[in-house]
Image: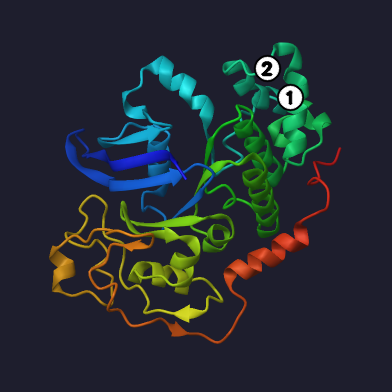
């Protein structure tokens, strides 16, 4: 498959200033990230809070400018486009935010919020806007007659479906979901994951899912990239990375999931400061397998479908099996099966 989105050597550092306003350092949010997303593919980006996932998502959409590196979308370098050309390109790229309570303007009705991209990009004539909004709401499982209501009249799950409808309005080729279900109840998460899975399949969307929930990523993603302190430490097909992880950090993440099928040595200590990240492998300060080389030499991802940035990846002992339990991904699938209705998802009650 051809690459729709390509990032090469992305770097983003946010300045830190002291009480007098003088620059006292910088937060290394993203440090040398390269990845590609093929047309129609779902890429999951996972890692602990503060590892740089959300910053990377915004860099991929050129919502913030990288300090170094390039982002190419459909062959165009987004970092070099003029303001007008970038505005036109934004029709093909959309973002679903984490917080459905903050991502919708409380001063706009649902109809106004969903119709805004239609007007901005002149997708349909004004006379057809109301019909198009009704169609989008129906696609995400809400009744069209709810379009005249205000965001505060909806639950969190319903607001997130409104946000999804707004993202679909411009008929994008790429959608980035920044923790799109983490702020929702577990049962509602399953409904929204079902909805996203159906939309990705039916509309042939290219999707980048940023999440710390490995069960959701396992269910949705084709490939997975694992981030730690601003760098990708493991990347490959979702089934390979999540079933046979090679990096000690990925192993520890999976072992922390209740019911996961293998144990791993626990991660000790705190995450190093992103203002002064450690040299060499950034995980070596917490890695139970670290050797002297890990403290001085920065590992690279290497080649192949399943790539890992670890000097010891080929010599690590295999994970210790646990007693057979229901894994986190299977729990999510059971919830999804339970909450998947034969028709559209229910809307708000009058």
Do the numbered discs 2 and 1 sit on residues whose CB atoms are within 8 Å? yes
Label placed on residue 132: 1
Q: Position of residue 240 (x, y in %)?
A: 45, 67
Q: Position of residue 326 (x, y in %)?
A: 62, 77
Above or below, 7 against 215 in this view is: above
Above or below, 217 against 196 in this view is: below
Is 18 in front, or is 4?
Answer: 4
Give SS at disc 1: helix
Label placed on residue 124: 2
Give SS at disc 2: loop
Describe residue 37's horizontal placement relative to residue 157 as left or right. left
Q: Position of residue 164 (x, y in %)?
A: 63, 38
Crowding at mark 1 (Cα within 10 Å: few <14, some 14-19, many 20+): many
Q: Residue furthest bottom?
A: 323
Q: Position of residue 75 (x, y in %)?
A: 39, 31
| Residue at horizontal 53 percent and vertical 42 percent from the top | 206
Describe residue 300's horizontal placement relative to residue 129 as left or right. left
Q: Residue furthest front?
A: 1
Describe residue 92's horizontal placement relative to residue 110 as left or right. left
Crowding at mark 2 (Cα within 10 Å: few <14, some 14-19, many 20+): some
Above or below, 249 against 86 in this view is: below
| Residue at horizontal 73 percent and vertical 26 percent from the top | 133
Displayed quadrant of residue 25: top left
Displayed quadrant of residue 15: top left
């Amino acid at each position: 498959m051809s690459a729709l989105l390509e990032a090469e050597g992305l770097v983003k550092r946010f300045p830190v200033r002291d009480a007098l306003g003088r620059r006292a350092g910088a937060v290394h949010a993203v440090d040398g990230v390269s990845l590609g997303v093929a047309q129609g593919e779902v890429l999951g980006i996972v890692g602990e809070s503060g590892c740089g996932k959300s910053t990377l998502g915004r860099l991929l959409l050129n919502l913030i400018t990288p300090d170094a590196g390039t982002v190419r979308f459909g062959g165009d370098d987004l970092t070099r486009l003029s303001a007008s050309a970038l505005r036109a390109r934004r029709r093909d790229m959309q973002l679903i935010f984490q917080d459905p309570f903050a991502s919708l303007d409380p001063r706009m009705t649902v109809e106004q919020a969903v119709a805004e991209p239609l007007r901005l990009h002149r997708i349909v004539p004004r006379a057809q806007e109301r019909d198009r909004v009704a169609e989008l709401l129906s696609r995400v499982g809400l009744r069209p007659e709810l379009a005249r209501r205000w965001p505060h009249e909806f639950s969190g799950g319903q607001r997130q479906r409104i946000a999804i409808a707004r993202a679909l309005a411009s008929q994008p080729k790429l959608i980035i979901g920044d923790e799109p279900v983490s702020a929702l109840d577990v049962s509602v998460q399953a409904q929204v994951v079902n909805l996203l899975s159906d939309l990705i399949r039916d509309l042939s969307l290219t999707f980048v899912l940023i999440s710390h929930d490995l069960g959701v990523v396992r269910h949705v993603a084709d490939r997975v990239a694992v981030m730690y302190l601003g760098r990708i430490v493991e990347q490959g097909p979702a089934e390979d990375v999540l079933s046979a992880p090679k990096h000690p950090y990925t192993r520890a993440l999976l072992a922390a999931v209740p019911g996961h099928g293998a144990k791993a040595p626990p991660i000790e200590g705190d995450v190093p400061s992103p203002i002064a990240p450690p040299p060499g492998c950034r995980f070596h300060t917490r890695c139970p397998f670290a050797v002297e080389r890990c403290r001085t030499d920065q590992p690279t991802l290497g080649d192949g479908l399943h790539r890992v940035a670890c000097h010891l990846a080929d010599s690590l002992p295999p994970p210790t099996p646990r007693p057979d339990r229901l894994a986190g991904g299977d729990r999510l699938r059971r919830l999804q099966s339970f909450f998947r209705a034969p028709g559209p998802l229910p809307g708000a009650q009058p």
